[in-house]
Image (cartoon, helix red, strand yellow):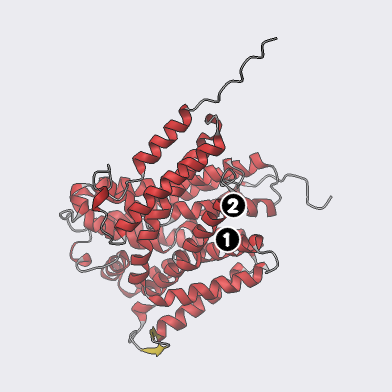
Amino acid sequence: MGQIVQNKQMSIADTLGLGFMTFAFFLGAGNLIFPPLAGFLAGENMTLAMIGFLITAVTLPLITLIAVAKANGKIMGLLPPLAAMIFAVAIYIVIGPAFAAPRAGLVAYEMGFKPFLADSNASFMVAGVMLNISQLIYTLIFFGGAMLLALYPGKLLDSVGKILTPIMLVLLIGLAISVLVLPGSDLGQAVGDYQSSPLTKGILEGYNTMDTLASLIFGMLIIDILRRKGVSDSKDQTKYLIRAALIAAAGLAFVYISLFYLGASAGDLAVGADNGGVILTNYVNHEFGSLGQILLAAVVTLACLTTVIGLVTACAEFFNDLIPRISYKVFVVIMSLACATVANVGLAQLISISVPVLYTIYPVAIALVAVTFLTKQFSMPELSHRVTLSVALAFGIIDGLKAAGFDMSVVDFMPLHNEGMAWLLPTGITIVACLMIKKAKPEPVLS
């Protein structure tokens, strides 16, 4: 018979563990560094900016996880095989070794280790590249640890969901309570785009967490973990995945709201900060001193480590399925080494490079989720999926080029182009047009 046919039910403790693990996978670098800065810059317009941020950083990832469950993990099944493979490879590279995982390692270094160093500037030159010694050593140890934990994915639920996450959650709850209880500064003036369009700016800032892209991957990873636990029925897999997604979404919303408020009420603690990590560090130092700094280092390191474990595991499984002759464990080693290498580029550079890529790829991911939910309403689902994603990609490229600094004034006439969301209206119109297409009824045969 081969595989176990029986379908196990998950206990409440297992379901909570799965939810905590899902939350831990999502709660990484971007989730901690972007909300405080966004809150500070939004100032008096914090509420609208926060709603926008929650749309792309909580609601969309939650809906995406449900879409993956609804499609039984085959969310790209109606695309041409080559296009589906290219899109999947692009997402895995972006949220794996190219951006998200190295960024998590860098944030762990910047916030969890660097503040304790007397001298963090010692560096040396290799092949024309200047490398920071402490950063290099830290990233090698950090990604080495993630690699060891990712080599045994069957134990992920137990090690991440039941041990690491509850510790991290307790520390985050303590931080959130302090933000609400301790007096902060008055909300300042909104800055830049947060003055004119705080909601749209908040939506675009939510892109930076990369969580909607991660949901496409984590959804499949969670289904795989459920199969390993003996949950073989697809309806049960969907049920448990949705429960896990709801737990994760509640946790993320709680963290974001408290961090937004922390940034908005930080006052002088945030002056001159170029990322939210600096604001968070300054706040904790100011309110709790060295003990607080140690606790923050623990939270950040745990958050980033659990995210990297999830990303390395998911990427290694994907590329192992794609190229079976190279084993899963070899891919774990390759991914971990690639992450450690990219992490030594530097945090500010990594974020600036990733923004245009996200502006291009995010519209396609959002469109994919939308058409997945509407598949049964389309009379020609395959065509509808392909046309909608092509339109989202075409306009996403325009937004990406603008974010990269190219002169795109020729398309200024397009609605929402200046806000960086030129893709939204054309993609929406395409979906409506696809819904209105009716299959031609066969002509009655005259006898």
Q: Residues within 10 Å of mark 2 (few under 14, many from 20)?
A: many
In-front residue for pair 117/88: 88
Q: Is residue 35 visible?
A: no
What number is the disc on residue 220? Answer: 2
Classify the position of the C terminus by image quarter.
top right
Secondary structure found at label 2: helix
Residue under the point 39% across and 54% down: 360
Residue 443 against residue 256 in the figure, above or below:
above
Q: Tell me which amino acid carries mark 1.
A: Ala
N-terminal of the pair, mark 2 or mark 1, is 2
Outermost residue, left side: 189
Q: Position of residue 361 (x, y in %)?
A: 43, 54
Is 365 drawn above or below residue 343 in the view shown?
above
Residue 357 on image: x %, y %: 39, 59
Taking 23 as reference, is 174 left or right?
left
Q: CA distance from mark 2 to mark 1?
A: 8 Å
- At label 2, which amino acid type do we have? Met
Q: Which mark is residue 314?
A: 1
| 266, 431: nearer the viewer | 431
Residue beneath the point at 44% across and 62% down = 28
Q: Residue furthest top?
A: 447
The location of residue 105, given as percent across then percent down, is 45, 71
Asked whether disc 2 touches disc 1, contact meaning CB atoms under 8 Å apart, the reply is yes
Q: Quadrant of residue 281?
A: bottom left
Q: Residue at x 58, y 60 (%)?
A: 314
Q: Is residue 180 above or below residue 149?
A: above
* Residue at image coords 34%, 52%: 398
Tell me the SS state at disc 1. helix
